Image: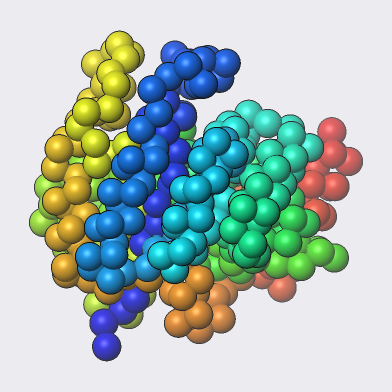
Amino acid sequence: MDVLNALTVDVEDWFHVSLFRHHIKRSEWDTLQSTVVVNTIRILNLFDRYNVKATFFILGWVAERYPELVIAIKEQGHEIASHGYGHQMVYEQSRAEFYHDVKKSITLLEEISGEKVYGYRAPSYSITRVSMWAWEKLVELGLEYDSSVFPIKHDLYGIADAPRFPFRVRVQGKGELIEFPISTVPIFGKNIPIAGGGYLRHYPFWFFSNGIKRVNAENKPTIIYFHPWEIDPQIPRINVGLLKRIRHYGNLALMEERVIKLLERYRFGTVKQVLQTLPPPQAWPRVGPGPQALKNHENNGMLHVHQQRKSKSENR
Ligand SMILES: [Zn+2]
């Protein structure tokens, strides 16, 4: 049988994206025209048509304002997961701020849906080398998986040498979680994203689709993501300069059709379902070349986040 891939939607409004964080103030969010409900409903109808279940990483800010949307997602049998509350980059928050931001979102989502939340995705994949401490907080919050690491080089995010497939992170004395990195294919020694979002909009479709095929041929799953605003060419425009405009607004009209083509070609399910199909994931990082902070604190190939943090502050 074909490999089951994870289908995910980051439920947020067009003005929440990190690309705009220096252009739109948080205090303005409530004054802007929201399109998240109508576009998420459109996605729910689409998934219903293809009889596919997905994981929805919902922003707490959205859940608080539109609880009926969370209920609609749940009632269609999809998985409810957390995208944090205020869409701040992990590495731009203190550990305490991050903990409270995620906790607030989990509390909201669990109260509205009546179901336990197991998964988290950071805004803009902002768990990087400098914010790996976030995993410790996620374990403390009782989460079982995270999907926030992009194993690529990028200006906003990425851990270029992270594993490409789900791995285990053990936090000393607290437990562990599974990290499901965003999908890539290696091309000439570099990991190229085949994970959705802007990549699905901007790459030629055949390239993207071949990437998924290649990963599935190795009997491995991909994880695909997109945002409700990405299927809506009518979202309000703001003037942010050419490059950001292309990144945010480029090819929106093509997106829905591309998602449909993926649903027709590949098998998809929720992150939880996909993780259940996998053999127990390996721990990461392994002993070997890498930043000193990690190399020094290996123990049986496990990353002991707590120990790493403690030793780092002792060294200061
Ligand atoms: Zn986001």
Q: How many marks?
A: 0
Residue 304: x and y in percent read 75, 60
Q: Is residue 91 left or right of residue 41?
A: right
Residue 300: x and y in percent read 71, 73
Is any atom of residue 298 visible in this view?
no
- Residue 24 against residue 254 in the figure, above or below: above
Display coloring: rainbow
Is any atom of residue 50 visible in this view?
yes
| Residue 36 sits in quarter | top left
- Residue 24 against residue 270 in the figure, above or below: above
The residue furthest right is 314
Image quadrant containing the C terminus: top right
Q: Is residue 276 left or right of residue 204?
A: right
Residue 5: x and y in percent read 34, 70
| Pick the front one: 66 or 5 | 66
| Residue 54 sits in quarter | bottom left
The residue furthest bottom is 1
The residue furthest front is 68
Residue 174: x and y in percent read 81, 64
| Pick the front one: 3 or 289 | 3
- Residue 295 against residue 176 in the figure, above or below: above
- Residue 93 against residue 227 in the figure, above or below: above
Residue at position x 28%, y 65% from top?
Answer: 48
| Pick the front one: 82 or 20 | 82
Residue at position x 24%, y 41% from top?
Answer: 231
Image quadrant containing the N terminus: bottom left
Residue at position x 57%, y 74% from top?
Answer: 282
Residue at position x 21%, y 55% from top?
Answer: 259
Q: Is residue 29 left or right of residue 191?
A: right
